[in-house]
Amino acid sequence: MDEARKLLDSLMGPSRNKSHEEQQRADAWKDANVCKRFLIGFCPNQGEDNWFKNTRRDPGTCSKVHSELLRAQFEKHPEKSRYAMGYEREFLNFLEGLIFEADSWISREKINCKPAGKVMRMPPHVEQNLASMQEE
């Protein structure tokens, strides 16, 4: 049911069940339930474009509206550049947060790695087996 609602919202806009006057609003893309990242071009948490799907870093899918109709209204708006700058700044903060989380995860995991300079020696019988396998 939820998937059907999302599909209808993306095709017809989130105001499909509202009155004709409300549907004709040229600034419906300003609503809080509309994904601003999608409006400026890319939502990394959109279902089919989720960068981190099936990973430990999966933030889930975006629950906001991704409507091509609203994107077209946004593109035609006379003050698009002013709004786009704010939305891009928010998106940049989101991306920098992802980078910070990844860097902190890397620094924590580096502790678990073997220190540089330590050499692991193979037992002589393993070296012989490896040499015979490489000759074949």
Image (cartoon, rainbow, N blue to C red):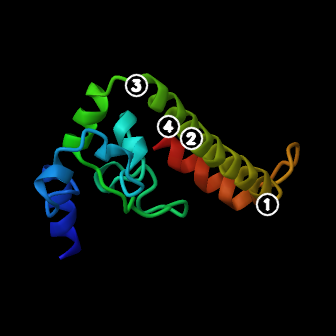
Identify the mark at residue 79; answer none if there is no mark: 3
- In the image, is 119 to the left or to the right of 11? right
Identify the mark at residue 112; answer none if there is no mark: 1
Comparing 37 with 126, the one in front is 37
Mark 3–mark 2 distance (CA, rounded to whole Å): 17 Å
Q: Nearer the viewer, mark 3 or mark 4?
A: 3
Identify the mark at residue 87; answer none if there is no mark: 4
Mark 3–mark 4 distance (CA, rounded to whole Å): 13 Å
- Asked if marks 4 and 2 touch (Cβ < 8 Å), the reply is yes
Q: Nearer the viewer, mark 3 or mark 2?
A: 3
Name the amino acid, label 1.
Asn
- In the image, is 11 to the left or to the right of 81? left
Name the amino acid, label 2.
Glu
Mark 1–mark 2 distance (CA, rounded to whole Å): 34 Å
Of the two numbered discs 3 and 2 on the same chain, state the one appearing first in sequence. Answer: 3
Of the two numbered discs 1 and 3 on the same chain, state the one appearing first in sequence. Answer: 3
Mark 1–mark 4 distance (CA, rounded to whole Å): 38 Å
- Residue position for label 2: 90
